[in-house]
Image: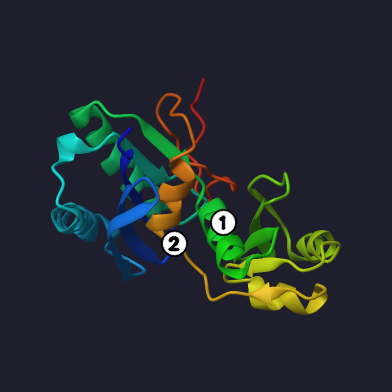
């Protein structure tokens, strides 16, 4: 059976990345660090990656995108682009959390059985998700994250808050991973069955609220 061909993208945090995979082989990958400009950068990066992979879009079997958490604008850029591609190509689209992609990369690169992505969410809170332990993506106070993660020996840590958490943990390894990589989004997505259209994962309500309707 030929390897499944997949296009994965991430625009959630301070980077824009694209990867094309055929099974476990990375055919092409592009990644640019950026705080803004994801919407303008994404389409040309996808085109370049597909060209480097030597594939036409109709040869893809599956699509993958990060759903969040992340910046409000960044999350929506990737999801909107890949939803449009899903409709145009009639291919299944899988949603992967940004934190799980970071944690899976950390686990693979360090060989540790459990990895956590701990990302600064401001306001003395962090976004947290673990791989190798059933702790789904959540936003929790920094102190709660320390209490939770300090109970796990030999963790691999990723994310912008990893260095602050590590001193409270036993034998933790702090990786250099601070943003998701589309390669790991794609690797996780290979084993996930697409169910409907992925939706953005917002772990914190928006600061701005619409005014209430008058009776």
The quadrant where residue 16 appears: bottom left
Give the colour scheme shown.
rainbow
The quadrant where residue 31 appears: bottom left
State the residue position of label 2: 13
For the N terminus, the quadrant is top left
Q: Which mark is residue 117?
A: none
In the rendered view, does 26 fall on the left or right side of 124? left
Residue drawn at (20%, 30%) of the image: 89
Residue drawn at (41%, 67%) of the image: 14
> Where is residue 181 shown, x and y percent of the image?
42, 61
* Label 1 SS: helix
> Where is residue 100 shown, x and y percent of the image?
56, 52
Spatial CA span between label 2 and label 1: 17 Å
> Where is residue 32 shown, x and y percent of the image?
30, 69
**Mark 2 / mark 1, whichever is N-terminal:** 2
- Residue lying farthest front? 1
> From where the camera sits, is residue 120 visible?
no
In the rendered view, does 25 fall on the left or right side of 150? left
The quadrant where residue 183 appears: bottom left
Residue drawn at (24%, 38%) of the image: 60
141 is higher (above) or lower (below) than 23: below
Residue drawn at (66%, 56%) of the image: 128
């Amino acid at each position: 059976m030929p390897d499944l061909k997949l296009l994965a993208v991430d625009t959630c945090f301070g980077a824009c990345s694209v990867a094309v995979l055929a099974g476990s082989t990375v055919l092409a990958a592009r990644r640019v660090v950026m705080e803004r400009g994801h919407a303008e950068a994404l389409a040309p990066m996808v085109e370049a990656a597909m060209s480097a992979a030597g594939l036409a879009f109709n040869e893809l079997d599956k699509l993958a995108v990060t759903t969040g958490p992340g910046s409000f604008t960044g999350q929506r850029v990737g999801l909107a682009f890949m939803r449009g591609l899903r409709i145009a190509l009639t291919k299944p689209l899988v949603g992967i959390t940004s934190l799980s992609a970071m944690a899976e990369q950390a686990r693979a690169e360090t060989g540790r059985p459990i990895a956590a992505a701990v990302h600064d969410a401001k306001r003395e809170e962090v976004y947290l998700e673990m791989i190798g332990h059933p702790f789904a993506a959540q936003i929790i106070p920094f102190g709660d994250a320390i209490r939770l993660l300090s109970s796990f020996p030999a963790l691999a840590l990723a994310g912008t808050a990893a260095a602050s958490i590590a001193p409270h943990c036993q034998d933790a390894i702090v990786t250099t991973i601070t943003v998701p990589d589309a390669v790991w989004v794609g690797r996780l997505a290979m084993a996930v069955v697409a169910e409907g259209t992925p939706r953005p994962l917002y772990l914190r309500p928006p600061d701005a609220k619409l005014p209430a309707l008058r009776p």
